[in-house]
Image (tube, rainbow, N blue to C red):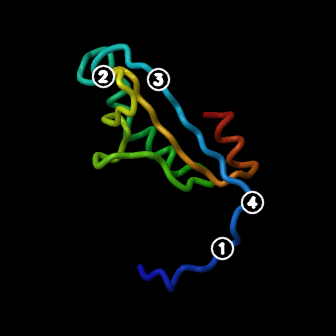
């Protein structure tokens, strides 16, 4: 796709950024985390398809599970940015 073929869009008035910080109960490869790991691609696909989706934090694998911005190896983060509008606000409240 060539960028010149993209139609110009008006700039949104607001963006919403969401940052989640959580602490794992066990290592990612443990049975405790198996359900989370199994659904990770589905959850990320939902985020990518959310109304107003702009960006989400991800590494080379397409998610943020390997990123460790803190000294604590058990702390995980994820982040996303969406265009701020009513549909986006509903997504945050409903998900």
The location of residue 50, given as percent across then percent down, is: 57, 49
Task: Report the residue that reaches farthest toward the front.
Answer: 71
Verify CB contact (< 8 Å) between mark 4 and mark 1. Answer: no
Tally the numbered discs.
4
Disc nearer the start of the sequence (1/2)? 1
From this view, report whether residue 25 is shown above or below residue 59: above
In the rendered view, does 94 fall on the left or right side of 37?
Answer: right
**Numbered disc 2: secondary structure:** helix
Q: CA distance from mark 4 to mark 3?
A: 30 Å
In the rendered view, does 86 fall on the left or right side of 43?
Answer: right
**Numbered disc 1: secondary structure:** loop
Mark 4, mark 2: which one is toward the viewer? 4
Rate crowding at label 2 as few (under 14), some (14 to 19) or many (20 or more) other CA atoms within 10 Å: some
In the rendered view, does 92 fall on the left or right side of 46?
Answer: right
Q: In this figure, which residue is indicated by the disc labeled 4?
A: 13
Q: CA distance from mark 1 to mark 3?
A: 35 Å
Residue 71 is drawn in which quadrant?
top left
Disc nearer the start of the sequence (1/3)? 1
Q: In this figure, which residue is indicated by the disc labeled 2?
A: 34
Q: In this figure, which residue is indicated by the disc labeled 3?
A: 22
Task: Report the residue that reaches farthest toward the left.
Answer: 29
The location of residue 1, given as percent across then percent down, is: 41, 79
In this view, the residue in front, 67 or 12, is 67
């Amino acid at each position: 796709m060539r960028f010149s073929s993209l139609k110009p869009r008006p700039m949104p008035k607001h963006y919403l950024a969401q940052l989640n910080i959580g602490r794992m109960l066990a290592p990612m490869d443990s049975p405790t985390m198996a359900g989370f790991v199994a659904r990770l691609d589905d959850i990320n696909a939902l985020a990518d398809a959310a109304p107003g989706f702009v960006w989400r934090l991800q590494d080379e694998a397409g998610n943020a599970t390997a990123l460790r911005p803190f000294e604590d190896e058990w702390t995980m983060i994820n982040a996303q940015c969406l265009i701020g509008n009513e549909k986006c606000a509903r997504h945050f409240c409903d998900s």
